[in-house]
């Protein structure tokens, strides 16, 4: 095992060893580049690196809750291209959607209790406040949205993962259509509905929603009907990200949920865990996944992963000592 110690500005013990470090299993193995996202913290600081996305130009967009620059845009080689944003102290979730040939950002802000839609350069187009018309909410303080998913028709799904655990469904104009979920251990309820995405791998749209504290992904219809669970014992997963037939998830804690742990989870088209960069090799017994745990101390609270057209991964980490993102190069 190679241990990594993280400090301000992203310095770590892997600097001298990372050039030859390979992580992952089977068909999904990666060479680690811990230097990729490093910038001058005096000019372009980060706090928590929460989420990332690839825009239509192939640029890598990072969301951080540092109000000197909430959005940082990188080239694929890790060069700083642009930064902006001083108004999102609780910047947490980032979804990028190309609408009519223009990239749009959907930012969830847990401190503002809002979802904000902006252009790629930060012009605000729409703000969705707390859903006062939903019975679960008495005031804005109960609404702590963590993630959004945007359907092909422009419908917006919001996961209130740190609040009342509801899933809010809006149309493209911001009109509330439905609310489902809520707190609970029942199949159609959530303990930490942290992430959400639209899954069209079966040919019809479904929702994949994280129940992070339960180590589960839950599948729902677009109308909010529970369909099935995907059990991932030992994996405290953040949002699901789909590329091709695979699902990628940053796993913010692992094993018993100990601090300073985590790895990346990669599921195949059958929703079986096939690779866990930074974690132990996935093993199934009689169809059930054996509990997962961090095997290599490479990551510290990975919070999101995005995938470029070459299937390289970019990993953002929360509460990791102001650490800039890593790149995992597919081999």
Image (cartoon, rainbow, N blue to C red):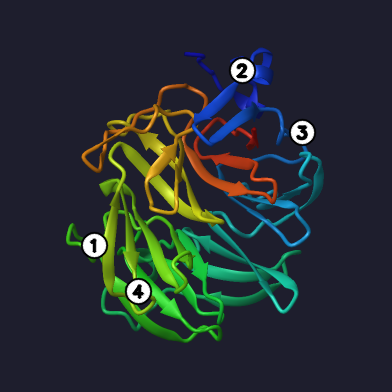
Q: Nearer the viewer, residue 80 or 263?
A: 263
Q: Of discs 4 and 2, which sits in the foreground?
A: 4
User: Which dot marks residue 40?
Assistant: 3
| Picture layout, residue 237 above or below residue 105 | above
| Picture layout, residue 2 above or below residue 22 | above
User: Which dot marks residue 221?
Assistant: 4
| Secondary structure of residue under mark 4 | loop
Q: Of discs 2 and 3, which sits in the foreground?
A: 2
In the picture, measured across the screen, residue 39 lies left or right of residue 187, that is: right
| Secondary structure of residue under mark 2 | helix
Q: CA distance from mark 4 to mark 2?
A: 43 Å
Q: Earlier in the sequence, mark 2 or mark 1?
A: 2
Please tell me how crowded label 4 is: few (under 14), some (14-19), or many (20+) other residues with Cα within 10 Å: some
Q: Of discs 1 and 3, which sits in the foreground?
A: 1
Q: CA distance from mark 1 to mark 3?
A: 42 Å
Mark 2 near mark 3, Cβ–Cβ under 8 Å? no
Q: Earlier in the sequence, mark 4 or mark 2?
A: 2
Mark 1 near mark 3, Cβ–Cβ under 8 Å? no
Quadrant position of residue 43: top right
Q: Nearer the viewer, residue 287 or 23?
A: 287
Please tell me how crowded label 1 is: few (under 14), some (14-19), or many (20+) other residues with Cα within 10 Å: some
> Residue 47, can we see it?
no
User: Which dot marks residue 296?
Assistant: none
Q: Of discs 2 and 1, which sits in the foreground?
A: 2
| Secondary structure of residue under mark 1 | loop
Q: Nearer the viewer, residue 331 or 90?
A: 331
Give the residue pinned by disc 2: 14
| Secondary structure of residue under mark 3 | loop
Mark 4 near mark 1, Cβ–Cβ under 8 Å? no
């Amino acid at each position: 095992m190679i241990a990594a110690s993280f400090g301000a500005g992203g310095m770590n013990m892997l600097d001298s060893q990372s050039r030859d470090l390979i992580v992952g299993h089977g068909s999904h193995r990666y060479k680690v580049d811990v230097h990729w996202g490093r910038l001058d913290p005096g000019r372009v600081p980060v706090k928590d690196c929460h989420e990332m996305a690839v825009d239509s130009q192939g640029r890598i967009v990072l969301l951080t809750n540092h109000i000197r620059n909430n959005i940082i845009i990188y080239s694929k080689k890790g060069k700083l291209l642009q930064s902006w944003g001083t108004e999102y102290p609780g910047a947490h979730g980032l979804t990028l959607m190309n609408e009519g040939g223009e990239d749009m950002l959907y930012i969830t802000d847990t401190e503002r209790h809002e979802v904000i839609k902006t252009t790629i350069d930060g012009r605000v187009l729409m703000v969705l406040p707390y859903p006062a018309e939903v019975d679960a909410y008495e005031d804005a303080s109960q609404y702590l949205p963590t993630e959004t998913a945007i359907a092909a028709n422009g419908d917006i799904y919001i996961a209130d993962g740190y609040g009342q655990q509801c899933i809010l469904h809006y149309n493209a104009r911001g009109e509330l259509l439905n609310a489902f979920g809520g707190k609970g251990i029942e199949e159609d309820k959530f303990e930490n509905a942290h992430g959400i995405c639209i899954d069209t791998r079966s040919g019809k749209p479904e929702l994949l929603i994280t129940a992070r504290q339960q180590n589960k992904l839950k599948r729902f219809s677009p109308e909010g009907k529970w369909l099935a669970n995907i059990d991932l014992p030992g994996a405290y997963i953040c949002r699901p990200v789909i590329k091709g037939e695979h699902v990628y998830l940053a796993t913010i804690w692992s094993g018993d949920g100990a601090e300073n742990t985590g790895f990346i989870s990669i599921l195949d088209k059958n929703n079986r865990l096939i690779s866990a960069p930074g974690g132990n090799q996935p093993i199934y017994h009689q169809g059930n996944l054996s509990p997962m745990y961090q095997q290599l101390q490479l990551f510290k609270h990975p919070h999101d992963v995005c995938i470029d057209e070459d299937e390289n991964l970019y990993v953002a980490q929360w509460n990791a000592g102001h650490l800039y993102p890593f790149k995992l190069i597919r081999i």
